[in-house]
Image (spheres, coloured by chain):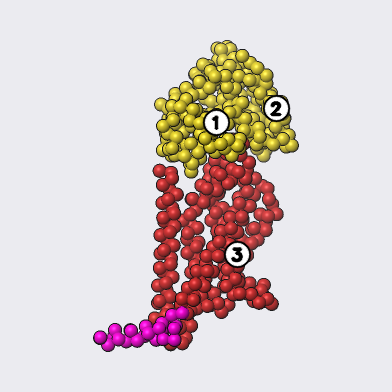
Chain colours: A yellow, B red
Amino acid sequence: MNGEPVIEVKGLQKSFGELQVLKGIDTVINKGDVVFVIGPSGSGKSTFLRCLNLLENPTGGQILFEGTDITDPGNDINLHRRKMGMVFQQFNLFPHLSIMKNLTIAPIKLLGKSKEEAEKTAYTLLERVGLANRANAYPNQLSGGQKQRIAIVRALCMSPDVMLFDEPTSALDPEMVGEVLNVMRDLANDGMTMVVVTHEMAFAKEIASRVLFMDGGYILEENTPEELFGNPKNERLKSFLSKVI
Amino acid sequence: MPQWLQNLADRFYTNFISENRWKYIADGFIVTVEVTFFAVLIGIILGFIIAVIRSTHDKTGKLKIPDFICKVYLTVIRGTPSVLQLLIIYFVVFGSVNISKVLVAIIAFGINSGAYVAEVIRSGIMSIDKGQTEAGRSLGFTYAQTMIYIILPQALKNVLPALGNEVIVLLKETSICGYIALQDLTKGGDIIRSRTYDAFMPLIAVALIYLVMVMLLQRLVAGLERRLNSSER
């Protein structure tokens, strides 16, 4: 099921001033991969994810997206970001725009789609996540789970080649986590390439094709979920798993 | 007619009707509205540009030199009395050219207002959560597009009451136009006073006109706020 590489990370480093958060990350994300990144707080997993679409500028190393080095300042990152959907912990919907406008503003302004075309795509996707009836609502009228499902649809409206999820369920009430995970599960089953930073271990076990364990700015172990959770080799991974499961 | 009422009617006649003195107030009113309107326009455009430059510098560290120029401008304008700015622009900057006083006042108040508007809008921009910028950028919008489509609409809505306040302050501030012998509303009332030696009638009349204008502005801003907020309900 794995195809050609979508994202290749080579010796990625990131420092905030004196603090070095990422000390050298190497990994490849192939087409169709569902990669989960787990690790304790402060391990650098969110920073790693945010480096993939240059929301954080790496201080060292390379990131190749579909063969292009996006860390090269000569490349227009805005063009690449269109193909990398991102979902945030805090949803970050645009509160001044209706749901439909939230979904269509980027396809219309960036991809040059007509309003009708963009709305048609948005509507189809809204139906898939069961929120077609909220198209004219505003973000503040939705629950957290609904907001996050809309945020996922907003990213999907750009027809991205890869979806990045930054702790998508961490800000949700427990009873709303399920609805968001269902949408993500559907996406994974449809063959979407996904990179997910999460604390949902059971979910990682269920849908991941590969799990990365990060701590102290390194990837300490990288394996299939069965192996990584069932037969952890790294000491820190063992102690981490003993605490969270 | 009782004596006191007759007295009041006489004074009204002397101050406003006789020799068409009401024209001082009417003409002054037009000047005041003119100066305020165009000064607000300049102030908002100027303030807007400065706010975007300053917040871009704050967020990204770029635009160092423009930011420095803006800071100097803000410090000078906010650090000196507006009467003095008006006098300097009239007697120093345009001292040797023949230029309409209304135009001088518009320029002076526009430049003055720009400094305050800039800080109001900048505070609005900085109050928007940085997640909004990140969401915009992650979709592929450039920094400028994110500003225009995502940040500024929210920022402007948030600072609308403060902007309305700035317009009100500016309207009243134009009453110093008399310093360059521009006959605005205040000056108009004062000229009548100097002719009739009656202070009460013209000054109270002028005060009432300002008050009504301010109240109308307040209602306008409140209406605008309601309309913008209804889009989020």
Horizontal placement of A60 versus B73: left or right? right
Please name the residue that numbered disc 2 is placed on. Answer: A64
Crowding at label 1, few (<14), some or many (≥20) Cα neighbours within 10 Å? many
Q: Confirm whether residue A31 shows in the render.
A: yes
Q: Is B192 situated above or below A35?
A: below
Question: What's the magenta region?
Answer: B1-23
From this viewpoint, which residue is outermost toward the left? B2
The three-letter amino acid code for the residue at tag 1 is: Cys
> Is B22 one of the magenta-colored residues?
yes
Q: Residue at x 67, y 21 (%)?
A: A5
Residue mark closest to the camera, 2 vs 1: 1
Whole-angstrom CA distance, mark 3 to mark 1, is: 44 Å
State the residue in front, B100 or A169: B100
* Label 2 with label 3: CB-CB less than 8 Å: no
Say which residue label 3 marks: B111
Please name which of the two marks, 3 or 1, marks the residue nearer to the observer: 1
Image spot of residue B129 (x, y percent)? 53, 43
- Pointer 3 indicates a residue of which chain? B
Secondary structure beneath dot 2 equals: strand
Q: Which residue is mark 1?
A: A157
Closer to us: B132 or A31? A31
Q: Residue at x 65, y 20 (%)?
A: A30
> Which residue is located at x 66 percent, y 23 percent?
A6
